[in-house]
Image: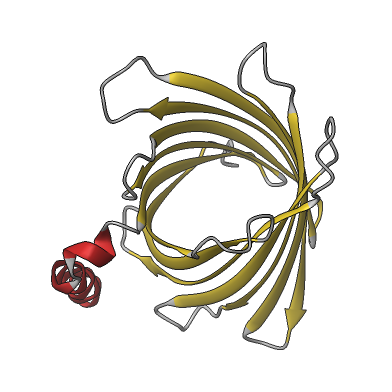
Amino acid sequence: MRLASWLALLLLLALLVPSSAVASVELRSAASFDIRIAGPLVVSLKEELRADMRPGEQHRWLQGVVVKIRPIKWLRIEPQYRLSRHLSAGGAEAELSHRVSLGLRGRIKLGPFLRLILRERYQVRFRSPQDPPRQHLVSKIAVKLRHRRLPLEPSLWCEFFLRLPEQDDPVLAEKIRVGVGISMPAGLCDVGIELQLEKSIKNADEVAIPILAMNFDFELDVRRKKD
């Protein structure tokens, strides 16, 4: 009942937002499926749709796979591949881009409830043979409130995107993104609701873009059970 109330409230707020405001929002919906193969090894499959409501902007359909390796309790290594389909409003043929990345994620306990998460990710995006690969370093710091007795898991975070030098472009700092969210267990899956704000550093005159996201996280444990 509590989950249904949250979702109903979110839907009500979305209906009350003026149409002029909705036109500048990016909406995201994603489903991830984590397969736990061993204690320190998880394979995650993810599908995501990003609908940019700004006039003339493309929508994107993303499919990715991440291997999550935890050699020690507080560290996770995450190689990843992602395929993006850029869908134009006119129904033209979708443009494809590929992204490979390698991330390191550390987790630190700050008392019985708080968790500090630090992540550094190097990523390379390939869009077409004519375009050079685009490289980024993405740094993220997040704080989560987590305890087994809490029905919700609130969090807040900040991401900084640093584009590595390419050709004659001297700009390194590209954008910053801040966000807040909650994760709610719903039996079959965990439901997450996020509100983010993305601001360009390269083009400082651009207006910040609000991002509203809803995530559905499923998990399957295929480890062999001991008799």
Q: Is residue 133 above or below residue 47?
A: above
Residue 98: % across, % down? 61, 24
Q: In the figure, residue 7 lies in which quadrant?
A: bottom left
Q: Is residue 222 above or below residue 214?
A: above
Q: Which of 143 and 147 is in front in this view?
A: 143
Quarter holding the C terminus is top right
Q: Which of 154 and 146 is in front in this view?
A: 154
Quarter holding the N terminus is bottom left
Q: In this view, does 52 lie above or below 47?
A: below
Q: Residue at x 43, y 28 (%)?
A: 86
Residue 152: % across, % down? 42, 77
Locate residue 172 relative to residue 29 in the image: left or right: right
Q: In the figure, residue 97 lies in which quadrant?
A: top right
Residue 188: % across, % down? 32, 53
Q: Residue at x 62, y 85 (%)?
A: 113
Q: Which colour scheme is used?
A: secondary structure
Q: Nearer the viewer, residue 208 or 169?
A: 169
Q: How many marks?
A: 0
Locate residue 126 relative to residue 118 in the image: left or right: left
Residue 27: % across, % down? 34, 53
Q: Which of 69 and 16 is in front in this view?
A: 16
Q: Which residue is drawn at 74% across and 78% down?
A: 109
Considering every residue shown, the one lying at the far bottom of the view is: 111
Locate residue 177 relative to residue 14 in the image: left or right: right
Q: Residue at x 24, y 74 (%)?
A: 6
